[in-house]
Structures are given as C-alpha cells and as structure tokens.
Image: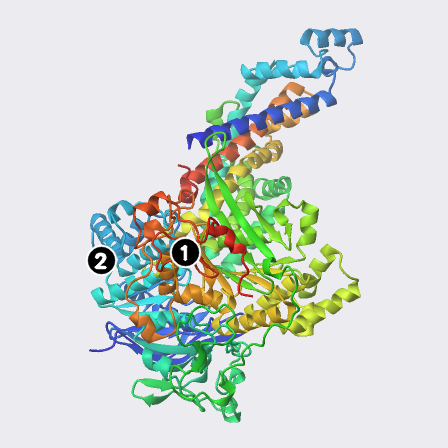
Amino acid sequence: MTAYLIRRFVTSLIVILGIAFITFLAVHIIAPSPGRAVLGDRASQAAVNAFNKQAGYDQPVWVQFLKYMWALLHGNLGFSYKSNQTVDSLIIENAPHSMWLSGISLLLSILIAIPLGIFQAVKRNSVADQSITAFAFTCYSMPQNFLGLLLIGFLAISFHLFPSEASQSEKIIPYITAVRANFLPILTLTLTAVAAYSRYMRSSGLDALAQDYIRLARAKGLSEARVLRRHLFRNASLPMITLIGLSIPALLGGNLVVENLFNSHGLGLLFINELGNEDFNTVIALTLLGGVATVVGNLIADVALTVADPRIRIS
Amino acid sequence: MPPVLDIDHLSTHIQLRKSVVQAVGDISLTIEPGETLGLVGESGCGKSMTGLSIMRLLPNGGHIVEGSITVDGVDVVKLSEREMRDVRGNDVAMIFQDSLTSLNPTMTIGKQIAEQVRRHRSVTRKVATERAAEVLGIVGFPRPRERLANYPHQLSGGQRQRVMIAIALSCDPKLLIADEPTTALDVTIQAQILGLLDDLKERLGMAVLLVTHDMGVVAGRADRVNVMYAGRMVETAPTKELFARMHHPYTQALLGSIPLLTQERHERLFSIPGIPPDLTEPPKGCRFAPRCTRATDQCREVEPALEPASTDHWFSCWHPVDGPIARVVVASPTAADANGSGTGVTATSVGGGAAPAPLAPAAIVPERQWEAGADDANLLMIDQVVREYPVTAGILQRRVASVKAVSDVSFTVGRAETFGLVGESGCGKTTLGKVIVGLEKADSGNVTLRGTDITKLGERELRRFRRDLQMMFQDPIASLDPRMRVGAVLREPMQVQGIGTHKQQEEVIAELLSEVGLPMNAVERFPHEFSGGQRQRIGLARALTLNPQVIVADEPVSALDVSIRSQVLNLMKRLQQTHGLTYVVISHDLAVVKYLSDRIGVMYLGKLVEMGSGDDIYHHAVHHYTAGLIATVPEPDPSRERAKSEIGIRGELPSPVDPPSGCRFRTRCPAAQDVCAEVEPPLRLFHPGHYAACHVPLQEPMPEDGNEPAVSAVSAPSGL
C-alpha cells in the first residue's frame, strides 16, 4: 500500500509540474509583456520596459518559469497587480466560499443520487423510474446557466421564495449561515450533479441486481430490504467512487458558472473577473489549482476504491 | 415416510415483452428423504426453471401458472412471500453454478454464512459465527476459523463452491437443490465436490435435487433420473434402468451423442439433427417429434402422455425404443494401435436391446483422401517452448517473480494428425495454443511450421504465415464481432491477406458455408441470429477461409450442448479428411480430446507430463496425474461410475508463480517420494511413441538405447 501511494504521489507531482509549465507558457504567449497590461494603454513604452525589467519579465521564458516554480515551492503564487495584493491572499479570501458551495452540493447530490438510483434500478421501467429519468435528462442536458436562470425566474422573481443573489458576506461564517440566500446556487449545482450521478447509479444498480449473489441472498431467505442494504448497496456504489472523484473538478468548474450567475464571492467569480483584467498571476494560479484538484480528486478516488473494494486492496 | 418434495403438475411461464415462454410444462416429480434425484436435459429445457420454481425465485416475468410444490407437507405455491422467506435457506437451500459470481465480493465468507444462520435461528452474532466455522469445517476447510475473514476472491473456484455448500448447509435444510454445481469446475475438483455432496447427504440425511446437463454426473450420483426436453418430463427411471433400458428416443439420442472414453474413435458420433423448439410456440404434438427419426403423423399431432413401463419407470412416447444405441467400443485394452484402423474393435450394445434401423451404428469414417507429402511427419514442431508472465511489485515495479505458464514443452505434429492437449485450467494449455499460432511470443524455444521457425519471424512475415495457422475459439459468441455480418466475418481474412477478387472471395464463402452446413443466406445475417452450434460452425468456417494447414481449436465444443456438440465434432472430423487439416485440440474434456486426437499430450502446471496415443493414455497411463485425471472423468455409465471408489486427485493446483521443486505434481501425487522433490523427472519412453515424466511410473519404461536423451525422440514419426 505504501509503495503504491508513493508511486501515485510521484506521478501526480509530475502531472502537476506539466500542468504548471503548459499554463505558464500559454499565459506567456498571450501576454508576453505584462507591464503593458499592468500599467495600461497610456503608459509610455519606457515605463513599461522599466516595469518588465524590474519585475524580471524581460528574461527568457525558462528562467521566468524556474523562478516562478521556485516561488511556488515556497508557497508564493505571485502578486496580483490588479487587486494590489498577493495571489495567496486572494485565494485565501475567496476559496472558503467556493469550497462551501461545492462541498455541500457534492454531499447533497451523493445523499440524494445513490438512494434514487437504487430505487430506479429496483423499480426499473415503472412510471416512477421513467419520470425520474425524464427529469434527470432534462436537468443534465440543460446548460447550467439556463437551469440557474429558470430557477431564478420561478423561485426568486415569480414566487419570491428565495433571493436571486447569493449572500454577499465576505466572512465565511455568515456566508454559510445564510441558507436562504445561498439556496438557489446550491440547488443549481446539486440538480446537475444528481442528474448525472443518478443515471450512473441506476445502471450500476441494474448490473448488480443481475448478479448471482443477489439471487443467492434471496435464496438465503433474506428480506428484500436486507438484500438491497447488505448486498446491493455497497457493490452498486463502487463505480460511483471513481465517478465522484473525477467530477470534483467539474464541480469546481460549475462554480465558474454558478458564482457568476448568482454573483457569489469565490474562486469561480474571481477567475472570470481576472481573466478579463489580464491579471496573469491570478489566472495561472487558479488554473494550476484546477489541475491540482483534478489530480487529487483522482488520487482520492483510487485510494478510496482500494479501501472499499476488497478485490483491489493492495497488500 | 412422506416425500420431502412432491411436485404435482407444475407449469411455469415466463412473460416476455410480446410473448410467453412456456418454460416448464406440466411436470410432476417426488423426492424421498435421503434420495438424490437427477434432473437432466440440455440448456433451455426447463430444468433450472423447475429448481427456481421450488424456491419461488423465478426471474422477472416468471410465474407459476398451475400445479403444487409440496415441501415437507407444505404447498409453497400457496405461501405468502413473507412465509416463503422462512422456507428459503431453511427447509430448502440452493447452490448455483458459478461460485465466483454467486458470492458477494465485498463481504467476508464468514459473514455470508452467518447471515443465513441469523436469519433463520434466533442466535447471537457470536453463535452464528461459531456455526459458520463449524460448517466450513464440515465442507472440508482445514482451520476454518481462520478462513472466516477471507473474501471470495482470495479462494479458488473449488473452495468457493465449498463455501456456497456451507451456506446451504448452515440451517440443516431438508432439501438441497444443486443447479449445475460442478459445471464451472475442473474434473479433479468436480470429483471432490460431488464426493462431498454425497458424503454430506449421507451424514445429514438431506434429499438432493441434482440439476445438470452432464449424464456422467448423474450416472454416478443420482438414485433416479428425470430427463427433461423442451419443458416436458420425457422419461423418469432409476439410474441404472434408465441408462440400460431407456424408452424415449431423446434419452437414447442424448446418451448416444456423448463421446465415450472407451469409444472407438473412427466411429462417427450419433447426433440429433436440428435444435430444440422455441418454447414461446411449442410444437403441437410430441415436442421432440421435429428432431426424432421415429416420428410419425401421430407424434406430430397428439402429444403422448407419461405412461408407466414399470412401477418406477415412466416415459412419454408413441414409438418407444428399448435400450441404448449400439456403439463400437474398444473391447479390450490391447496394445496401443496408433493407426486405429479397426483391429481389436468389436461392436457391442451395452444394454443388450436391439437398436432400431434409423439409429444403427454410424459408418466408420473412410480412410484419408489427401495426398501425402515429404515433410508431412514433422509439419509442426514445438521445441522447448517457454512462456512466463512477469509479476511486479514495489515503487519501481521491479520484476519479482513470474507466472510459469508454459515451461519447456516439446512435441511434433504430423500432417492431418490431431494432437490433443489436456489438463486442468491453469496448466498452460491455452497459452501454448496461442504461442503456436503466434498470438503470444515464446520467451524461448521454437515453433517450426514446415521448416520455418515462426518465433523468429517479423510482424510482416508472421502475417503471411497466419494463413497456415488459424485458431478456433471456445466462445462462439464472444469471438465473433456482433456488428459484422457473417459474410464480412468470412471475407475479412481474405481481405487482410489480399487474396482474390471480390467475386472470387464470394465463391470461397459460398463454398465454405455449404461445407460447414449453413444456408447461403447466412452471409447477410448477424452472429446473434444463429444458435450456439451454428455460431461454432461459423467459427470453423472462418478458420478455414485461408485454407490453413494447422487449426488450433481451444475448447471447440465446451460451450455447446451435448446434442449440438456431436454435430460439431463430426464436422471437424469430416473437414480434416477433406482438407488434410492438422488440429491441435485443447480441452479439459478428456473424452472429447480422446475422440478427436491421434495423440494426446497431458499438461500439468506448464509441463508436458505424458504423451502418447489415445489408447496409451487411456489404457496404459504411466503418470499418476494422467491416471488420476482419467479416474475423475464422469462417465455416462452407472456401473462404471459407482465402481469408482477413490476421489481421484487430491488437493488443488499449486501456484504457477512458485511451482513445486522437482516433479511439479508431487504435492498431489499418491506415490511421491523424496527423489520427486529433488530431481525433475525427464520424459522417458515407455512404448513406441509413448512418453512420460515420472520417477515412480505406473509401468516400467523401455530400456534406453545409448546416450540419446528421450526428449529428442519426440520428433520421431508419430502414428502416421
């Protein structure tokens, strides 16, 4: 197990290095002279050159990359000239809001989708199953932005049940306790995830139901509820672990849309704003963060699977 | 004493989307306490559905239409679902065919057993676990307590089947339904499991319903046998009576189409034409009539009722037969005659009854028709082939060990000869087959076809050689692309090799189809539109497309029903005659290999332990493994089966990662001595063409002449 973990950790590190390099190169190609972006169109060329020289942007790309990586190793993500603060502090300010939105939506969608999928598998082709399938496909196929707009249109504007904007609190505790204000963004994220997860859960539930061990469990005289709880649930949920691990970055991506739509503080909104501002250090840092989330999500899923499935437990 | 199980006029239907399958039609049977009733028939005949009806665990859409099923005085058809759950696992227990998929992979075996105990007995978890350990001990696990925490994947197939039996036993059921309990197992393990079931039946006084397609299994284990065909019970009799004096033509044909170990191998197998009827629309009269050679208009119009021939022998037929088909059986074990031209062979009828005209002994296959060539004797030479798969571990994935799939195997096959490879699963026979056709690279050693070493060929040259080396696979469903029409399947090899124009290719395909007995319109159809036997014919046609010299057939008939099996075996033999084909037949089924092969190689854990003609192997086995293997093959002959006392081969196959030192079989050998652990036995000559590697052989080897090592003699002319 330890050898496996070390191997996975090392390969993850290599992948993250690769992501960092490609992102850095891409941003460098788009904005080769950051001084112009920082100082504005009206600044003189001499001022821009002076800025670039002072900040080291006149050096060859690979030297800049190595310097960036060295700073990164020390936890220094650079300076955001637009916000006039370090990227580290920007992320620390905005991350908790995004993590709360993503985390609570992920948790809710797992808690809803797994029983829902099993229910659909057991009652396959019934009216209930078909209705849920229709609903899931509707939510899944709709652009998240449009789904959010629909929810705002009905629940916020027509019926005034919830505000159309997320909590504007900059502190995290008041943000979390503002349940009513954050209801719609969380609902939007959860609906999309439930739609996808319940489809997978239904098909893996159907696969498991067709297995002989379910028949043997019934042949033991166990009640149907016990058969489902003891024999179906765990086996059918195994494929979900990988799926959830893989969808963690997608959930962060969902934040991009949802935070923008509901004007909620967070990394997604920050990314969109800073992309427009050509705030290169912040953009690189957030892209890198997305890459790390993908790699870590994968790693967590694989490790969780080795724990949950005795067949792939590594001695 | 009242019967444990009394089924009275049971009919079970399965509702499909648009039609109803009449899976079980008007079946009656009883089982007395302590009795084993064999329920035999081909797939789709309703035997499993009968078992599942008793448990009321029918698949979706399945329901009992009429009849009663009385278990120990209670009609279970009338019970509510809640009451039925108290019967399942308690009064009646069931074990299924596939022990890998029948045990929950994420639950320890201890919990899986204890779960049933706790369901039916109001005991604490601790007591239930105690009981689990106890039943594991009963089914033959040494130190059962330590095994409770094992997961199913940590056990071998045989051990998993023991666990399933332990679950079934845990609540002392009165009736055990065993649905193909040993079909997925090797013969050696099958013998152990069947022995265990017999022993448990004696000790615990259970009644057993043994559902199987294998006449050999019921011959040795069942007290009475019920034969099912197309949802109907066609014949029931005490086992000995049924095998000796059956009255239903189907029973007779079923037995007649099984290749016997004692059989003269140039005799064509009897085969039943056609396939079983579609049970959504069963035929009006006798359901066997469309395939029966004795059928008359009466059979096609009026269904015969089950009539008694004697008090305990019932059958349903208008034109009954009396006893089995006469077969040509090798009368006495004479000195092995590799030519097998008919000397020392007599026609006997086991049951003594005169066989009717249409079922008369089939013609002896005529002598070979192709022209002989110069290099015929050494067409295919396998020389010291080794194939190992690496096992890696650690951070850097270093190679720490290897799975020794094939270790130093040599033999030679002549033109138009059939070489059979037998052994338990995991003995390396399939890997060797893949090496022969070039689908796997040998780590060392040579495979020489007509003087060319194919292991030394580059990719491009090897592709040219594939014309002469073709493979026939076990699973005709999985080995044909479901999205390709049969015409395209047969055309593809010619396209790849760039042979012929489109029109010429079509002519070849038409010729092939008629040769393997498929209609011309097959070209336009997809593989799933054919039955299993027809698909295997397509597989054979595909292998023949390029007119190869050698066909490696890996378990060619294992996936097929008995009656279909004999059709394919006969076809393979006929094609060999007309094309001068060389076969390497790989199978775990000794009877099939013996029927097809001129010479047989017995493999054990990657080693070739014995090689010789079919008669050498069967009548004069030298190696203890070969002898044990033969003893475990269930034969469809009750008197022979019951005479077998020992269980055959003890234990299970050791790991091929770390095979035993010296002779690899010594850990399971009854005659193992110190020398067996120290020195690896060489192949020695025991009779012309008969080699074996054993230190304590069952007969004396021939004196060795000079310094010539025995192994090199494998290239001596084989029995051509």
Q: Is A54 rendered above or below residue B343?
A: above
Write down the residue under mark 1: B703
Closer to the camera in the image, A170 or B176: B176
Query: Element under label 1?
Result: loop
Is residue A1 something one can see in this rendering? yes
* Residue type at numbered disc 2: Arg
Q: Chain of mark 2?
A: B
**How far across and down, in percent of the image, does residue B719 sit?**
53, 65
* Residue type at numbered disc 1: Pro
Task: State which quadrant residue B187 falls in.
Answer: bottom left
**Mark 2 crowdedness (10 Å alpha carbons): few <14, some 14-19, many ≥20:** few
Closer to the camera in the image, A110 or B87: B87
B656 left or right of B75 in image: right
| Coloring scheme used | rainbow
Q: How far apart are labels 2 and 1 at the CA level?
A: 67 Å
Q: Chain of mark 1?
A: B
Q: How many marks?
A: 2
B652 left or right of A88 in image: left
**How far across and down, in percent of the image, does residue A236 sit?**
45, 49
**How far across and down, in percent of the image, does residue B309 sit?**
34, 89
**How far across and down, in percent of the image, does residue B574 sit?**
59, 72
Closer to the camera in the image, A177 or B176: B176
Of all residues, the one furthest to the front in this rendering is: B706
Sequence-wise, the earlier of marks 2 and 1 is 2
Write down the residue under mark 2: B121
- Figure quadrant of the N terminus of chain B: bottom left
Which is closer to the viewer, label 2 or label 1?
Answer: 1
Res B663 label: none
Q: Is B598 rendered above or below residue B157?
A: below
Query: Element under label 2?
Result: loop
